[in-house]
Image (cartoon, rainbow, N blue to C red):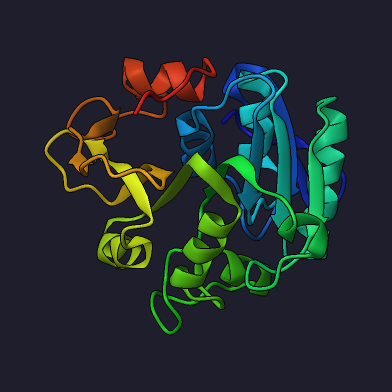
Amino acid sequence: MSRPARSEEGLTRDCLLGGRVTLLQPRRGYRATTDPLLLAAAVPARPGDSVLELGCGVGTAALCLMRRVPGARVTGVELQPDYAALARRNAALNDLPLEVVEGDVADLPESVRQRQFDHVMANPPWFPAGGGAPAVRDDRELGRREATPLAVWIDTMLRRLRSGGHLVLIQRTERLPDVLAALGTRLGAVRVLPLVGRAGRPAERFILLGRKDLRTPFRLLPPFILHEGARHVADRDDFTAEARAILRGGGALDI
């Protein structure tokens, strides 16, 4: 993501994917990092496919996916009205037909509950209730700490996914046992891609991709390394070539 430019009070105007996506987001509160870009890059959508994102925020992942896959039909569900309104503004700003629906993951609006999708993606809150350091702002807290249990997020994703469709999520590594337990046998061809900041370091996050109703065995993939070198040594972009192709070039993350 580029450095934020001045925008209207309380918002910044940021450029993603090497300028392919422009994003208005709160100056303070929950802001996009590399996670939604990696999530969007991991969805194996094709033109014409339907995609649902739960907890779409200001539309970061949804719009990045739509820019990479022209013709993908994407619906985002967002609980917080201010963020949903920004997602609609960002869709218009990028001239992309993102459908944004206000609603709760635990109780989806009827307009979404009646549909099934080719792909469902999500970046659920990282910390369980009572876990992690609390955020200063309430809106950021909702994005970081679950009010709705992770198992409910996963159940909702599976219910809205057609048979054979892809579920894609990004989460902290410590939550992988919870994710696998919630999935049970309802998802097959499961691939887990550890995300590593620098070579030799533990994976702090992972991306999981699987297909509903398949029985193909589980696979743990080699880690995806985001940054070059053992540590950050200068105020510059030190992404690996593979990470730069996704985060700057808008490429796909092939899992």
Which residue ends up furthest to the bottom in the rendered image? Answer: 130
State left or right for residue 13 relative to residue 176: right
Is 87 left or right of 178, judged from the image as shown? right
In-front residue for pair 144/169: 169
Instruction: Pinpoint residue 105: horizontal percent, then vertical percent.
Output: 64, 66
Hey, which quadrant is residue 244 in on the image?
top left
The residue nearer to you, when weighing 191 against 176, is: 191
Q: Is residue 197 visible?
A: yes
Residue at position x 51%, y 44% in the image: 163
Q: Where residue 72 sits: x, y (%)?
A: 69, 26
Quadrant where the image shows the C terminus: top left
Residue 24 higher or lower than 160, as above or below: above
On the picture, is 108 further left or further right than 173? Answer: right
Residue at left offset 32%, top offset 45%: 188
Instruction: Specify the quadrant that holds the N terminus.
Output: top right
Residue found 80% across the figure and 37% down from its top: 90
How many numbered marks, from 0 up?
0
Q: Quadrant of residue 181?
A: bottom left
Res. 33 visible in picture: no
- Given residues 135 and 37, the one toward you in this image is 37
Image location of residue 110, percent across then percent down? 80, 63
Q: Residue at x 20, y 40 (%)?
A: 219
Residue 221: % across, % down: 20, 35
